[in-house]
Every structure is written in C-alpha cells, then in structure tokens.
Image: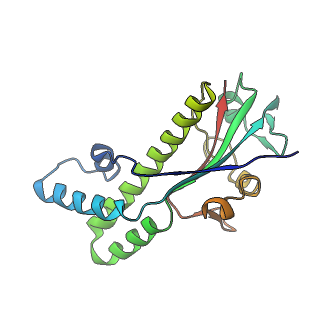
Amino acid sequence: MSITVLTKAYFDLPFNKKEILRYADCKEITPEIEKLLNECIEEATKTLSYKACYCILPINISGNTIDFGAFKVNSEKLTINLKDCKKTVLFGATLGTNIDRLIMKYGKLSPTKALFFQAIGATMIEALCDEFCNEIKSNLNVNLKSRFSPGYGDLDLSCQKDIFKILNCSKNIGLTLNDSLLMSPTKSVTAFVGIY
C-alpha cells in the first residue's frame, strides 16, 4: 500500500493568554504575573517551531478492530469515534525542542517561568492541532470528528510505533519516540481525525 505523507509548517500562531493562565492554574492575575507572562510569551515566540506531517488512510471497522490498510488497532472508543467515517487523517504535530529547553532552563532559575512555559507549550500544541485540522477541513471541504490520540480511552500507546513508522515523524518533523513510547519533543501530538 502506497501512502503519501505530507508536511506543513505554520508561523505566528496567536497566543491565548486566558488559556495559558488556565493551564498554569492561575486564578488571580496581578500586574506582576501579567508582566512575567508577557516576558515568557515574548521569549517563546522566538523559539517555537510549528510543524505537522500527515496522511489520509482508509478505515475498515470490524467489531472493535479498525484496519487502516497499513496497520490495525483494537479500540472500542476509537471505533465509536470513527463511526460513519470511511477515511481518517493520521497526523503528528510538534512545537520543536526549544520549548523543552526553556522549561528545563527555568526549572532551575525561575519555577514560575517554568510553569508558564509548560502552560504555553500545552496551549500552543493545542492551537497548532486546531489550526491544522481547520485547514484540512477547509482544503478538503469535509467535516472532521474530534481528534483521538494514542493513550486516550482504550487506545493503547503501542500503536505509536505504527504511527511513527508510517508518518516517518523523525525525518519529517523531528519528532521521535523512545522505548517507553514517550515523544520528544514533549510538546507534541499524534492523532487520528475521522473524515465524514
């Protein structure tokens, strides 16, 4: 089965301060906190690298087994998510290694800044996934189901091996998978998005 994998790069995604503060579990915004957050956003802006790679795979469901042509997974929850879909977008997305470096650096120098960089990373990887999915939806003129990632519900993390093999994430966007099935850079996502 021949699979075409495409890559995308994005620039200057908008920062949602309210969402960053939510991820940081920050209930009260003082002038000092706002100043610190703005400093972190300014520093992160210079370092974030928004990349995605993806392919479109067929879906054939039998019971709780989903056959994507190139590999199969067993998941009741993903089966429910992909119900009524004939194809799925399989994608990987990452913010690059620099956000991890900032988190590590400020973990020693300023725990509050490290917390903000964690929150910025969490917010911006979601923003990248949203931007990617909106673009796919618009370009293909289709509707998409909600994203479904390995480790969510009953979808075993082990399917990451197949995902990384098919998307060649390491070569295409610099995203790697270790023996414990953890991704590096950490602010990264792989997911299935059903097309219906």
Query: Extreme left residue here?
Result: 31
Figure label count: 0
Q: Position of residue 65 (x, y in %)?
A: 81, 36
In the figure, is residue 139 to the left or right of 124?
A: right
Query: Extreme right residue here?
Result: 1
Q: Position of residue 57 (x, y in %)?
A: 76, 38
In the figure, is residue 84 to the left or right of 183?
A: right
Residue at (80, 39) in percent of width and height: 68
Between 58 and 74, which is closer to the camera in this rendering?
A: 58
Q: Quadrant of the C terminus?
A: top right
Residue at (66, 59) in percent of width and height: 172
Looking at the picture, does residue 176 appear above or below residue 63?
Answer: below
Q: Quadrant of residue 31?
A: bottom left
Q: Position of residue 177 (x, y in %)?
A: 66, 64
Between 143 and 192, which is closer to the camera in this rendering?
A: 143
Mark yes or no: residue 150 visible.
no
Between 52 and 121, which is closer to the camera in this rendering?
A: 52
Looking at the picture, does residue 66 appear above or below residue 96?
Answer: above
Q: Quadrant of residue 170?
A: bottom right
Residue at (33, 78) in percent of width and height: 108
Colour scheme of the rendered structure: rainbow
Q: Position of residue 22 (x, y in %)?
A: 31, 46
Residue at (16, 59) in percent of width and height: 35
Q: Quadrant of the N terminus?
A: top right
Mark yes or no: residue 52 visible.
yes
